Image (spheres, grey):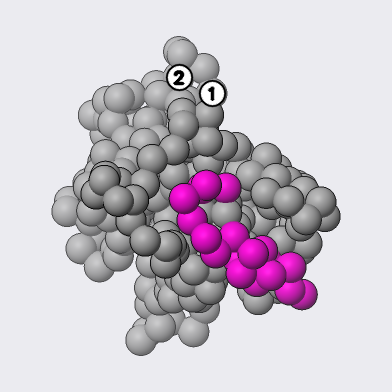
Amino acid sequence: MQANLRIRRYNPESNQKPWWGEYSLNDVNPNDSVLDLLHRVKWEQDGTLTLRRSCAHGVCGSDAMRINGANALACKTLVARLKRSESDQSVKVQVEPILGLPVLKDLIVDMEPFFDHYRSVMPYFMNDSAVPNDGRERLQTQEDRARFDDTTKCILCAACTTSCPSFWANGKYVGPAAIVQAHRFIFDTRDEAAEERLNILNEQFGVWRCRTAFNCTNACPREIEVTKAIAEVKMALTSGTV
């Protein structure tokens, strides 16, 4: 089958504003991923195309981009899913960089503002209490683990945050991904810094900027219930208990 790609291009060294590059590929397999198509464009037609990718297996999260208007990982988005019907022998694919972050070149955005928000919620285990006398690790029940198990799946691809209208409106908003990371530790019974994280998220550009649009949940390639996690953080703030 044939794939017709429309790719948002931008090179700050030679372009004053973004432009659309159009490319056609033949002999495309429906099980090819969008990342496969982008590789073919770069390797066969235009070596100047710039994109970010690493594992190509949906683990690293580095190839998040807008595909046909929705955030997704290019390596996990198959051509077959983009066809309008099973009988189609061609498919249209529009690819753009994720929104809300500065574009460095073509499909690559500056992730530093995103990671600044991530670091702001102290996304690491904090416990200054002595280790149990028997020398074993700090244990918890399966029920306690289940409270935050979903939010351990985040791969920091930024698909959720850059799909959020509140983040588009004001980049100071900490964003869904940072809240998900905070949730993972706030509800971990072994951690001792829940109050500090909740105070951070209770600030002006914290969790209350969420307007429950559900874009984040729809965009997550790991199927994390992002909006639910945000609601649980809000509930912890309003109730005063974790």
Residue 195 seen in this snapshot: yes
Name which quarter of the figure residue 227 lies in.
top right
Mark 2 against mark 1, which lies toward the viewer? 1
In this orientation, which residue lies closer to the viewer: 212 or 180? 180
In this orientation, which residue lies closer to the viewer: 49 or 104? 104
Name which quarter of the figure residue 57 lies in.
top left
At x 34% / y 51%, what residue is drawn?
132
Q: Which residue is mark 2?
A: 88
At x 71% / y 61%, what residue is drawn?
207
Q: Position of residue 28 (x, y in %)?
A: 27, 30
59 horizontally vs 67: left or right: left
Above or below, 14 against 78 in this view is: below
Q: Residue furthest top?
A: 87
Q: Amino acid at mark 2?
A: Asp
Q: CA distance from mark 2 to mark 1?
A: 7 Å
Disc 1 on helix, strand or loop?
loop
Q: Residue furthest front?
A: 133
In this orientation, which residue lies closer to the viewer: 192 or 97? 192
Label at residue 113: none
Disc 2 on helix, strand or loop?
loop
Q: Position of residue 66 (x, y in %)?
A: 50, 51
Q: Are marks 2 and 1 in contact (CB under 8 Å)?
A: yes
> Which span of residues is magenta-colored?
187-204
At x 64% / y 64%, what residue is drawn?
195
Q: Position of residue 18 (x, y in %)?
A: 50, 72
Q: Amino acid at mark 1?
A: Arg
In this orientation, which residue lies closer to the viewer: 172 or 118? 118
Query: Is residue 53 magenta-colored?
Result: no
Query: Is residue 192 magenta-colored?
Result: yes
Categorize mark 1 by other alpha carbons within 10 Å: few (<14), some (14-19), many (20+).
Answer: few
Q: Which residue is mark 1?
A: 84
